[in-house]
Every structure is written in structure tokens, then in C-alpha cells.
Amino acid sequence: MLADDTEASDASLTQTTRVRILAAAANLIEKGGGDAATTRAVAAAAGVQAPTIYRLFGDKRGLLDAVALHRLNTYIEEKSSRLPDPDPIQDLRNGWDVHVEFCLAHPGLFAILSADPDRESTSKAARAGLDILRGRVRNIALAGRLRISEDRAVDLLTSVAAGTVLTLLGQPPARRDHGLSIAARESVIATIMGEGAEAIDSHPNLAAATLRASLDQTSVLTDGERHLLTELLDRIANGS
């Protein structure tokens, strides 16, 4: 067997092992939450030795994050058979619904990702979800329909969505008030759009948010000027 063939075979075997470990960990999490997915339990369920898990994922935290990212990507692929809605607001609605549905379907993974506030900065799954959300918010700003800064809009959406999921998970599944998610979603959208606010020529928030979103399309500013203008525009966009 040639060296290239051997390397390809080893890579295939490693990927197969990785998928088996992820499936075993996900199954344990679904049944008993993050505490059930100990390294020993996952190794036994996947039919591997514990050092294999450390070699592929680093530690338990890395494993849990890999499970969350794998499940999230799979779920998004299953739900994304259609192209993004051309209306950025409707696209945000669709994204909200997919996110809430995913969290309700996988409460163990949601608990893992939301239990540690510091985890957001290191979790690939959390960063992937935030990148998608930021893209949707940016599209709303570029359409001239965002009345607050993008950062505040993202923070508002993530905090309200997390609270909505926690509330729904606390309700018996048979009596879960799914209308609550719709009400929360529409309330946040109304806030970030400034629904009922004055026209753009009499209220600078919309203009500031729109210009802020368009800065990446300009090349006439220095890095220092871009940083200063970004800070000023965010301040105006968030002003009353």
C-alpha cells in the first residue's frame, strides 16, 4: 500500500471514530444532560479508550462543544432547504424559529451552551450561531431598517431568545405555550426596527445604523478614522 493510501485510510478511520464518539456523547446528553457525558461514559458507549477522546477533542469541554456544533450544523442543514428570505426581517423571523425549535429539541445541549457565560467566547458552536445572527442583523441595517446599533440588536435578540427558551423548557411539553416565542420575537423585532418611530429625516438613529453597516464598503478612511466613526455611529444609533 502506498503512503498516500495509508494516510487516507488513517484519516478515514479517524473520522469514523470521531463521528462514533460524537453520536455516543450526543445520546448521553439527550438522556441525562451534560453531566451524563463523562469521558469514561462516552468512551464506553463509543467503544474507544479515553485517550482517544483527548487526542481528538482535547478535553470534555472540547468534546461537548464539538457535539453542539455538529448537532447545530446538522439541524440547520435539515431546515435550510430553501434560500434565505429576500426580506431581511422575515429571514430573521425564520432564523429565530429555527433556533428556538433546536433548543427545545435539544435541551441538554442548550443547557451546556448557556450554563457558562464565558463559554461564548471560546465555543465554536456559539460563535457559529452568533455569526449567522450578526449577518442577519447586518442585512437589516443595510436595508435601512435598523434603529439601534448592530451590537445592541444582537445582544437583545440573544438574551430574549435565551429567556424564551428557558421559560418554554420550564413548561410541561404538552402545555407549552409556543405563542410565547412568536410574541417575544415580534416584540424584539419591533424594538430594533423602531416601529412607529419618526421618519429618518427627523430621527438620526436609522441613518446612523445604516451608515455604520455600510462602512465596510468604503475605502477612504484610515483604520483610526474608521474606528472613531464606528464608535460615534454606534452611540448615535443607540441614542434616544
Image: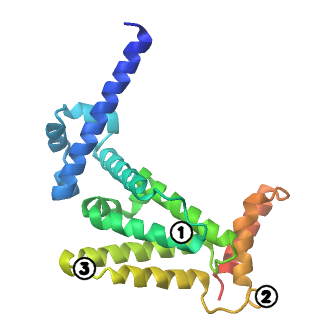
Q: Which residue is rendered at x = 29% and y = 79% of the image?
A: 167
Q: Amino acid at mark 2?
A: Asp
Residue 92 sits above or below residue 52 on the image: below
**Residue 39 sits in which quadrant?**
top left
Element under label 3?
Answer: loop
Q: Which residue is rendered at x = 19% and y = 47% of the image?
A: 38
Mark 1 and mark 3 in contact? Answer it, CB < 8 Å: no
Does the rendering let one see residue 172? no
The circle drawn on residue 176 is 3
The circle drawn on residue 201 is 2
Residue 109 or residue 176, whichever sits in front: 176
How dense is the environment of label 2, judged by Cα within 10 Å: few (below 14), some, or many (20 and up)?
few
Question: What color scheme is it?
Answer: rainbow
Element under label 1?
Answer: helix
Q: Amino acid at mark 3?
A: Arg
Q: Which residue is rendered at x = 74% and y = 84% of the image?
A: 204
The mark that comes first in sequence, 2 or 1, is 1
Dot 1 corresponds to which residue? 91
Element under label 2?
Answer: loop
Residue 215 sits above or below residue 143 on the image: above
**Residue 195 sits in which quadrant?**
bottom right
